[in-house]
Image (cartoon, rainbow, N blue to C red):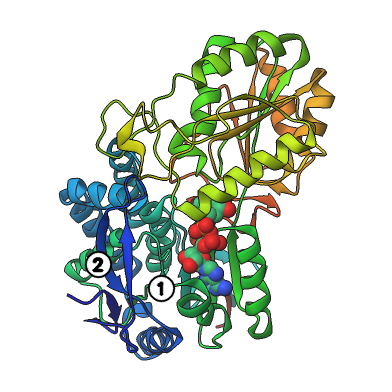
Amino acid sequence: MPDLYVDGRWRAAAAGGRREIRCPADGTLVAEVDEATAEDTAEAIAAAHRAFHEGPWPHTSARERGDLLLRVADLLERDKDAVARMESLDTGKRLVESEYDVDDIVSVFRYYGRVAAEDAGRVVDTGNADVVSRIVHEPIGVCGLISPWNYPLLQVSWKVAPCLAAGNTFVLKPSELTPHTAIHLMRLLEEAGLPAGVGNLVLGAGPEAGAPLSEDPRVDLVSFTGGLATGRAIAAAAAPTVKKVALELGGKNPNIVFADADLEVALDYALTAVFLHSGQVCSAGARLLVEESIHDRFVDALVERAGRIRLGGPFDEKAETGPLTSAGHRDKVEAYVAAGIAEGAVLRCGGKRPDATEQPELADGYYYLPTILDRCTSDMSVTQDESFGPVLTVETFTGEDDAVATANDSIYGLAGAVWTQDAGKAQRVAGRLRMGTVWINDYHPYVPQAEWGGYKQSGVGRELGLAGLDEYRETKHVWHNI
Ligand code: NAD
């Protein structure tokens, strides 16, 4: 069965391109999929444009659109096992993590299914009884949705659910490395009754299949999640047609541990913060800032525990983390660690691939050992650049002001965490961090009703929550002189 979905039909790429998808855990062939070119994307844009400007979808009631999203949530729940398996084969991540992801995806569809009809606008008091002045929400139009490989369907759901709730049409271009769950989602949207042309799917490389979404004047909004360099290119390509642009980019997220924290708990979370999914998480706590007075005992314990983390493939139930996504990505992580050591960072553990004689099943995967670089400073490339791998850098600070200044010394501002048992200090520091999410005595949790996004060069706009719905809506003032 062909893999591109355009105007309500499944079809192959016009130029006949195909791509092999291989599991990063052992290199086995998962499947071959169709690989679109700019020509396919242009057709998908045309279909989305027709569906928006000629079709009934933007004028359906918000309740109807919400009901469709709720049906999709039910279908995803029905297919949970198959979807989690697909996600793990494409990404190499542990099956249990993919299962959590599917639960989260279901919640995102349910949340937007429920709020779709909640907020119909407002009436403005003009002081004139003969005038009715209303503020109404309308869909933006055709949306180009471009997503990454680390949380493939989760990132897609953060875009597709609010996009449809608001009444838009879309062309989705998921990462070329991890297409299977996006294909499955389109089948579920079809099964749930999405009209032809409202949702379209193209697969393929960014510069070919993705680029038209930021350039084409028929696209009204491009919502992108991915790396900073790609985000800059997309914003530049979208500028001539003054598209709305929403960007969810990278992060170099500080995890700040004060001496008065519950150190046992902080230790466990510091490991999960950075090594979950081998560090391939935009909000990974990859930059540990630890108060100088506890540096030695905290970092010694961290190194000891990091050395015991077990690597393994998606179906290894004892594995605690998995492989990197590709050989090329592992090469980049290796170069990043080498640069840090050359700059003066002290390698405390990891810094290499696992020994395949000890764990032969890892030999063909793109594994890299959990790595800790100690005695780093904020002027080093390793504390400033995102590695997107299992690498923790350690810096020290003395007192609140130093912690805040060091944490904010970054071009990024996606997320961060504060560990202390002093509630006042926790709130003061959280208030001064220039980041879209701050966790206090926790790391990583999120809920679909709370906004997600970055300050500074971590992005533009918000996903999730009501602001995530607003990204997909225009606001109109209707003045009626009765
Ligand atoms: P990437 O930028 O390489 O690719 C992301 C997507 O953009 C892919 O679908 C790719 O094909 C497409 N693309 C590439 N060039 C393009 C172009 N010129 N025009 C249009 N599309 C193009 O990112 P990645 O390696 O897939 O993902 C990792 C990055 O994503 C990390 O930097 C991570 O921090 C970031 N990320 C951010 C968030 C967040 O919420 N802020 C979430 C997940 C990932």
Residue 268 coordinates in the image, percent (x, y)? 50, 18
- Residue at which label 2 appears: 189
| Left or right of residue 96, residue 376 in this image | right
Task: Please name whichever residue, 215 or 17, is drawn nearer the observer in this view of the structure.
Answer: 17
| Left or right of residue 291, residue 107 in this image | left
Task: Please name whichever residue, 424 or 370, is drawn nearer the observer in this view of the structure.
Answer: 370
Q: On the image, which quarter does residue 158 sit in?
A: bottom left
Residue extending farthest front: 357
Q: Is residue 422 visible?
A: yes
Task: Please name whichever residue, 479 or 386, is drawn nearer the observer in this view of the structure.
Answer: 386
317 above or below 233?
Answer: above
Residue at image coords 49%, 32%: 369
Labels 2 and 1: the sequence-earlier one: 2
The numbered mark at residue 157 is none
- Callout 1: few (<14), some (14-19), or many (20+) C-alpha neighbours within 10 Å? many
| Count of numbered badges drawn on the protein | 2
| Left or right of residue 449, residue 246 in this image | right
401 above or below 482?
Answer: above
Q: Quadrant of the C terminus?
A: bottom right
Q: On the image, which quarter does residue 358 sit in?
A: top left
Instruction: From the image, state whether disc 2 or disc 1 is nearer to you.
Output: 1
- Residue at which label 1 appears: 204
Q: Identify which amino acid the numbered label 2 is placed on.
A: Leu
Residue 366 coordinates in the image, percent (x, y)? 42, 45
Residue at image coords 30%, 51%: 87
Query: Is the residue marked 1 within 8 Å of ligand 1, measured from its CB?
Result: yes
Residue 429 coordinates in the image, percent (x, y)? 73, 27
Q: Which element is circle 1 on?
A: loop
Residue at image coords 50%, 34%: 444
